[in-house]
Amino acid sequence: MRKSAVASSIALALMAVFVFLLAEVVSPGHISGLDQAVNEMIGRQSAWTVLLSKGLHFLFAPLSVIVMTVATATIAWRKIGQKEAVLIAGMMLLATAVNHLIKLLVARPRPEDALIALSDAAFPSGHASATAVFFGILCMILVPKLKPGLPRVSMISASVFVVALVGFSRLCLHVHWLTDVLAGLALGGVIICAGALAQDFFSTARPTKASATRRSR
């Protein structure tokens, strides 16, 4: 119950952040100038920064994420469990569907100085949300199976670093505004919390069913 309460509280807080950012995009207000200021501050990047950002762009492109998700879910099905495999695939599918739906509804243009030509809308960042969900779900499943201490800290730290790096790369390529990236991360966090709630529900439902079976015998 405590895990569910924490996950629900975090999900509500992140949803509030997402709604605030969405409102700012739809009807510019308090932070309307922040996107342009950050875009100008970042400016043109060095060749190696652009190369790294483009590499991350293609590594976490929709097709690549699908391949990684299928491969990870297959390994989880064989090595960890069916519920974990379904959780990985289901949360990634949910993240993709919600992200595309919001993009269609908001239809926010990308920055004009983008270094990569993209045809879809900017808000929210699909790369940021997909990366957050992918590594967030992996940590949720694998961290409890690791030894306490350095192994757990290392996996969480590496995951946070990659997610942050991908988010920053979207700004370096000028394919997203800052609010797009923040909204993508917030949306990804909400979906991770939904996954945590689903995992908690099924993990508590299974013993209950088993104990009911024992009582009937």
Image (tube, grey):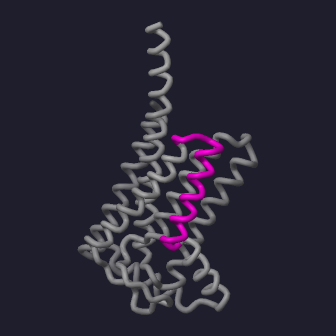
Nearest the eye: 56 or 87: 87
**20 relative to 116, above or below:** above
Task: Verify whether residue 82 appears in magenta.
Answer: yes
Residue 1 % position (x, y): 45, 30
**171 relative to 214, above or below:** below
Image side of residue 65 versus residue 52, left or right:
left
Splitting the image into 4 quarters, where does residue 146 fall?
Answer: top right
Give the magenta part as a residue range.
61-83
Residue 178 % position (x, y): 44, 75
Residue 18 % position (x, y): 36, 61
Q: Residue at x 72, y 40 (%)?
A: 148
**145 relative to 186, above or below:** above
Image side of residue 27 versus residue 185, left or right:
left
Splitting the image into 4 quarters, where does residue 101 fall?
Answer: bottom left
How many callouts does the rendering have?
Answer: 0
Q: Residue at x 63, y 45 (%)?
A: 78
Q: Residue at x 61, y 66 (%)?
A: 162
Nearest the eye: 9 or 30: 9
Nearest the eye: 33 or 8: 8
Image side of residue 3 versus residue 49, left or right:
left
Residue 189 % position (x, y): 46, 55
Task: Verify whether residue 76 appears in magenta.
Answer: yes
Q: Residue at x 44, y 41 (%)?
A: 197
User: Most prominent secondary structure in the magenta stretch?
Assistant: helix
**77 relative to 29, above or below:** above
